[in-house]
Each structure stands twice: as C-alpha cells, then as structure tokens.
Image (tube, grey):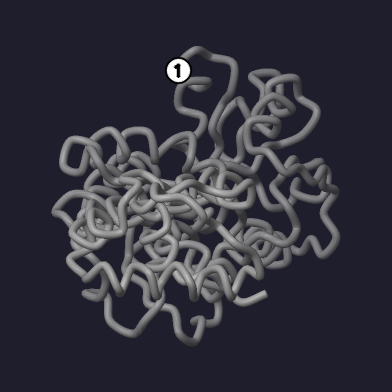
Amino acid sequence: MEIIDTRQLRAFQLLAQTGSFTAAGKAMFVTQSAVSHSLKALETSLGCSLIDRSGKRVALTAEGEALLVRANRILDEMAKAGEELRTMGRWGYGRLRIGATSTLCQYLLPAVLREFRESFPHCEVAIRTADTHELIGHLHGGDIDLAIAMRPEPDEPGIASRPLFIDHLVFAVSPLHPWAAGGGAPEETYAEQRYAIYSRRSPTYRLFERHMVKGGVTSPQVIELGNMEAIKELAKIDVGVGVVPPWMIRDAVAEGSLVMVEPKPSPLTRQWELLTRGRGSDEGSIMLETFAGICQTVSRELGETAGRDRPSAVEGR
C-alpha cells in the first residue's frame, strides 16, 4: 500500500466534517472537482470505498468511518508538530543537550541551570551523565551539544574546547590517619597506603598513577569506585585514602570528619574544559554560548577553592 497523501487525507476529513464537496473545496481553497479527484485517488490507493455515493448526501462507509478516526489523529499530530517547530524557532525556545561527569552534575550544574533558566525559561535542557571518554563519544555521535569534562589527551580531532577551570587532587584522610597530623603526604609512605579512587579508565586515575610512579610506587593498592561520594565515605572510616578535589570535601573538612592532605612533592593538577563539536570556540547557538558563559562564571568558585596555591602549569589532565 502506498503512503497516504496528507492533502488527500485532509480533503477526506473536511468532506466528512462538512458533508459537502463544495464546502470542503472552499475550506481548502480548491474547486469541488479537485476534492472529488483527491477522494477518488485516496480510495484507489487504499483499495476501498470511503463514501456511499448512492444517496444525495455524503455518507461514510464503514471503511470511511474507520479511516476518519485515524485521519483525525494523524492530522492533529501533524498540526501539533508544526506548531512545536514554529515555537522552537522563536527566541528563547529550543533544546540544549548537556553532558557532564557525575560529580559536576552534583556540584556545578544546579547553580548553572538555575541561572540559565532565568535567561531561557522555555528551553528544554537534557543532561547526560558519563565519564570523559564517553562524553567525547556522545559529542562525535551528535547525542549531546556540549560536554563539561576534563581535557582529553591527546587533543581530540573534531572537538573544540575552551578552558573552564583548573583544580587539583588532594588526599582525603580520616582524622585518625597518620597523615592527618600535618606535614603533608610523604612520598616514602605512599606504598604503605590503600587508595580509594575513581575508575581506572578516568583521566583522574591516570594522573594519580603518574604521581605514584614519580614517588617510586608502580603498583599502588587501590579500591576502585565509580562514585566520588563513596570515596569520601571510605576515607571517613579510614578504609582508604581518598583521592579527590578539595571542593568536593570542603564541607566534610569543615565539620572535622575528613582532613585534607596535599600530595608531595608537587600537586596533581587537572584542566576542566567545555567541549563542543567543531573547530572554533565561538561556534554554536546563542543558548549554547550563554550556557557556556554561565558555566565559566559559576565554576570560578571551584577553581579558586581548589587552586589558590596551584602552579601556573597543568601537570595532568
């Protein structure tokens, strides 16, 4: 069966509603003859009669009654689709698909979304949570418009980036841990510790691994976790040394359930970036650019909290 022509379907619907070929033609701004031809073509494509031609008035056959129910639904949905597309073309309407790591979804995005909604209350925002390498894949696949993630290494072809903020990793330990007494984390004691750290596939783990190798530890004892909050909880009960950014544990440090210890001899710095498809950082819609600008403003607190004494160069990503 051929795909139904929508103009033929509209002609049939109007004919059923008005009961007159003339009235249906006037509603469509065509002649009575054009409506008649559309109906015959529709009946031919469907292989059945839709109206009873034996009487003076237009009466639907059983097949016509069944088609009218479907036609009303189809044409109504098409009208709604057209209105939705016209709405999306108006200022302030549309959609924005954001990807971010789970930690930033908790600590950064709520404040960003709150401010973004004030500028674009009618924009539909979808959030996808994933790790950096997965977010880059989603960008390439066109599943998201913007990713908030750590800078990929090496640089990813076809992905444009702009700096967001720099932070660094610290060791989070229980107040009962030997490192909590002060003096930082001596390299000679690295091998004695068990570390609670995020996924081995993450840039955070690779940065930690390089730091351990510099300290002479090639196979550190680790508890690999997929949730940064779980890392905090293990550190609190002294099951492992948490490897986390300072902005994630500042509340726990303030309440005394965790102690923040700086790695030695150098910090483990990370570069967070906004990633988009394309070559230039100025590409994209006004909504995307506004969202990116708010991210840069809100994230300053994370960068300042994490990096008041950070070095000017980024050692890892």
Dot 1: within a 10 Å radius of its alpha carbon, few (fewer than 14), some, or many (20 or more) residues? few
Seen in the image, is 90 located left or right of residue 110? left
Which is more toward the observer, 42 or 124? 42
The image quarter containing residue 259 is top right
- Locate residue 46: give its quadrant: bottom right
Instruction: Give the residue at the far top of this rendering.
Output: 255
Question: Residue beneath label 1, please?
Answer: 254
Can residue 136 be seen in the rendering of this structure? no
Height in image: 7 above or below 62?
Answer: below
Q: How many marks?
A: 1
> Which residue shows up at 51% across the image and 70% down it?
42
Q: Is residue 286 visible?
A: yes
In the foreground, 57 or 259: 57
- Residue 230 is left or right of residue 42, and the answer is right
Q: Position of residue 7 (x, y in %)?
A: 37, 68
Under mark 1, the amino acid is Ala
- Nearest the viewer among 164 and 94 is 94
